[in-house]
Image: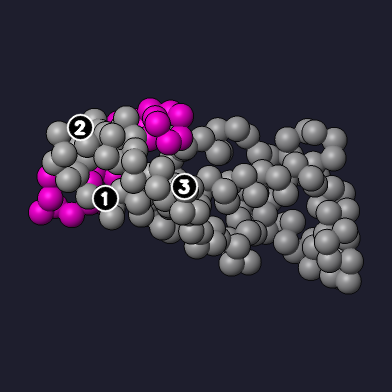
């Protein structure tokens, strides 16, 4: 996709002190037996509390397999890192959605070549039409369509997981 080719990746995001405190409180609330870590089920409850959805089996498996095998679950430091990455990915998807929506003036869910040209003329008026056509062609070849669907932004979406950092 053009954004990743251009280097537009989720920026390193830091939680506010109050948000960080909330994450720690959720960790402690979900670690009911004060084990010092979250089990798989504890983690699922924490995600519901913070993000409002229950993680799929695939998502939970991936997270659990990414933690230190010498521990019995997700330690606080790991949990905070997982939540931060999730929040970064969420903000990045929202930013992409916002940009796409601004360019999709006719609310069709996809961009035509004309939409693409108008968008680039707005944000980069000195960019040559040849470059704009090349970018559009590359996008069409890569994705076959410039459509944006709600499924592309679901937390449980396949593709690169938000906790992988990649």
**Is 94 left, or right, of 38 in this rendering?**
right
Span highlighted in magenta in the image: 47-74
Number of residue marks: 3
User: Any magenta on residue 56?
Assistant: yes
**Is 154 left, or right, of 131 in this rendering?**
left
Q: Nearer the viewer, residue 32 or 114?
A: 32
How far across and down, in percent of the image, does residue 165 sit?
Answer: 41, 58
- The residue singled out by tag 1 in the image is 76
How far across and down, in percent of the image, does residue 68 sit?
Answer: 18, 54
Can residue 117 be seen at all in this image of the molecule? no
User: Mark 1 or mark 2, which has the lower sequence index?
Assistant: 2
Quadrant for the N terminus, please. bottom right
Q: Nearer the viewer, residue 124 or 38?
A: 38
In the picture, the disc for residue 19 is: 3
Quadrant for the C terminus, please. bottom left
The structure residue drawn at horizontal position 32% and vertical position 30%, both measured from the top left corner, is 45
In the picture, the disc for residue 66 is: none
- The residue singled out by tag 2 in the image is 32
Judge whether 155 appears above or below 76 on screen.
Answer: above
User: Mark 1 or mark 3, which has the lower sequence index?
Assistant: 3
């Amino acid at each position: 996709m053009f954004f990743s080719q251009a280097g537009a990746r989720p920026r390193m995001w830091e939680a506010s002190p109050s948000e960080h405190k909330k994450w720690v409180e959720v960790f402690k609330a979900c670690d009911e037996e004060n084990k010092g870590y979250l089990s798989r089920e504890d983690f699922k409850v924490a995600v519901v509390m913070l993000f409002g959805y229950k993680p799929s089996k695939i998502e939970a498996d991936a997270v659990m397999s990414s933690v230190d095998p010498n521990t019995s679950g997700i330690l606080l430091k790991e949990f905070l890192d997982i939540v931060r990455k999730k929040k970064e990915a969420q903000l990045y998807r929202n930013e992409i959605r916002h940009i796409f929506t601004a360019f999709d003036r006719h609310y069709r869910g996809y961009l035509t070549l004309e939409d693409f040209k108008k968008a680039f003329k707005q944000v980069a008026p000195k960019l040559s039409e040849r470059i704009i056509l090349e970018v559009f062609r590359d996008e069409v070849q890569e994705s076959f369509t410039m459509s944006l669907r709600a499924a592309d932004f679901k937390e449980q979406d396949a593709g690169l997981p938000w906790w992988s950092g990649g």
